[in-house]
Amino acid sequence: MKLAPSAALFALLLALARPLWAGPPFVTDDPDPVPYQHWEVYLASTGLRAADGWSGTLPHIEVNYGAAPGLQLHIIAPMVAAQPAGAPRQYGYGDTELGAKVRFVKEGQFGKDTPEIGVFPLVEVPTGDAARGLGSGYTQVFIPMWVQKSWGPDQHWTSYGGAGFWRNPGPGNRNWNFAGWELQRDFSKTLTLGGEAFHETADTLGAKGGFGFNLGGFVNFTDHRHLLFSLGRNGQQDHGLLWYAAYQWTF
């Protein structure tokens, strides 16, 4: 059945407003929590440009806190923009992300080859206006497991990745899976570069999943101020252009 123009626009807005969760500056995350009683604060923007338009955060604020040894609490508060091709731009507060990263195994805990292992469940709280395409209108949940290993002189090589399941309720939506892996190298105390490859199954009925990738890294201006960036292709939305940029404070 062909959708009426207003219904098609509504469905497109919801699709474009799909959050772009990431382990800054990548989509794949790691199991390494913020150290106990320390903070990470990001002023960031992430977005997706596809054939049917673009969406993103302009900006979002991410805060992570080491609440206990091996435990990180997490929140993202986003301002979201979405503009389907040929339609007016929508802008406003989006869905709030809450999470808790828990590390079960430290790297090297049971021998030098033991990787770091943890989980990072996330909840997307439907605080955005779904009628304007600024939120999903439903509570979404992501349950992943992540592993990480470092090696080489001064541990200048690091690789991490894992997989997880998204619960994605709502008309026309479907639950979906994510799997990804990242590799990075510290070229100096100032510069780290890396890349990731990931796969996503379809998150809506009639859509197709696929593979995506990102290339990026971060620059350490000081021990407490950092620039993070990445650019690549999404695993969904016709493999649209995916980007992330952030200024980070650590203390």
Image (cartoon, rainbow, N blue to C red):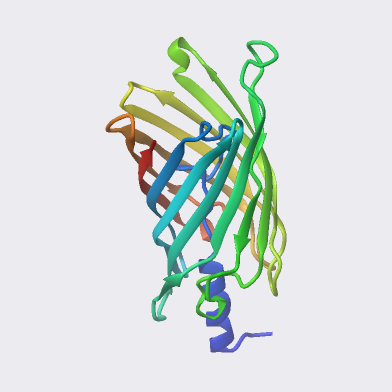
Locate residue 72, reporting x and y percent: 57, 40
Residue 160 visible here:
yes
Give the camera-side residue of 132 and 67: 67
Depicted 174 relative to depicted 32: above or below: below
Examine the image and state in which quarter residue 180 appears: top right
Farthest residue in the left direction? 221
Q: Quadrant of the C terminus?
A: top left
Give the camera-side residue of 214 and 32: 32
Locate residue 84, reporting x and y percent: 45, 74
Give the camera-side residue of 201 and 45: 45
Q: Quadrant of the N terminus?
A: bottom right
Depicted 239 relative to depicted 193: above or below: below
Examine the image and state in which quarter residue 116 appears: top right
Residue drawn where x is 51% and y is 42% of the image: 65
Locate residue 79, reporting x and y percent: 42, 65
Locate residue 154, reporting x and y percent: 44, 13
Residue 236 visible here:
no
Residue drawn where x is 39% and y is 37% of the image: 250
Residue drawn where x is 44% and y is 18% of the image: 156
What is the total number of numbered labels drawn onto the structure image?
A: 0
